[in-house]
Image: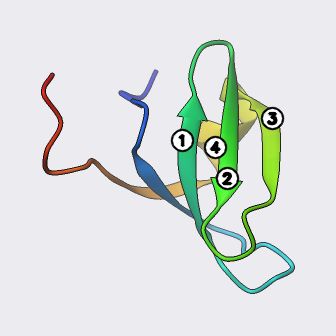
Amino acid sequence: MMDLRLGDVLTMKKGHPCGENRWLVLRTGADLRLRCMGCAHEVMLPRVKAEKSIRSIRHPENSST
């Protein structure tokens, strides 16, 4: 299980139809709510499916945790 936190930016293996492949994590748990950084479209994905398609994770620098 990956360490995903609110505010993380995920780079996915496949791009969104708008051309962007970076997503912002809005909700974590059994499902992830992600927002496309290009067009602001939001999706809910099962954690298992999302983790398989993550290429990299960028944590925000100013996180207090």
- The answer to whether 2 appears left or right of 37 in the picture is left
Q: Return the mark for residue 40.
A: none
Q: Which residue is mark 1?
A: 25
Residue 16's image quarter?
A: bottom right
Q: What is the CA distance from the residue labelled 1 to the residue labelled 3? A: 10 Å
Residue furthest top in the image: 30
The residue that appears at 67% across and 45% down in the rendered structure is 34
Q: Which residue is mark 3?
A: 44
Q: Nearer the viewer, mark 3 or mark 2?
A: 2
Bin the neighbour count of mark 4 within 10 Å (Cα to Cα): few under 14, some 14-19, many 20 and up: few
Tell me the residue at 74%/86% (across/down). Answer: 19
Label 2: element kind: strand
Between 17 and 13, the residue placed more toward the observer is: 17
- Between 53 and 40, the residue placed more toward the observer is 40
Q: CA distance from mark 1 to mark 4?
A: 15 Å
Q: Which residue is mark 2?
A: 35
Q: Residues within 10 Å of mark 1 (few under 14, many from 20)?
A: some
Q: Position of residue 2 (x, y in %)?
A: 42, 28
CB-based contact (under 8 Å), mark 1 and mark 3: no
Circle 2: residue type? Arg
Q: CA distance from mark 3 to mark 4?
A: 15 Å
58 on left or right of 52: left
Labels 2, 4: front one:
2
Q: Tag 4's secondary structure?
A: helix
Tag 1 or tag 2, which sits nearer the N-term? 1
Question: Amino acid type of disc 1?
Answer: Val
Closer to us: mark 3 or mark 4? 3
Q: Residue at x 18, y 36 (%)?
A: 63
Q: Is residue 64 above or below residue 36?
A: above
Three-letter code, disc 3: Met
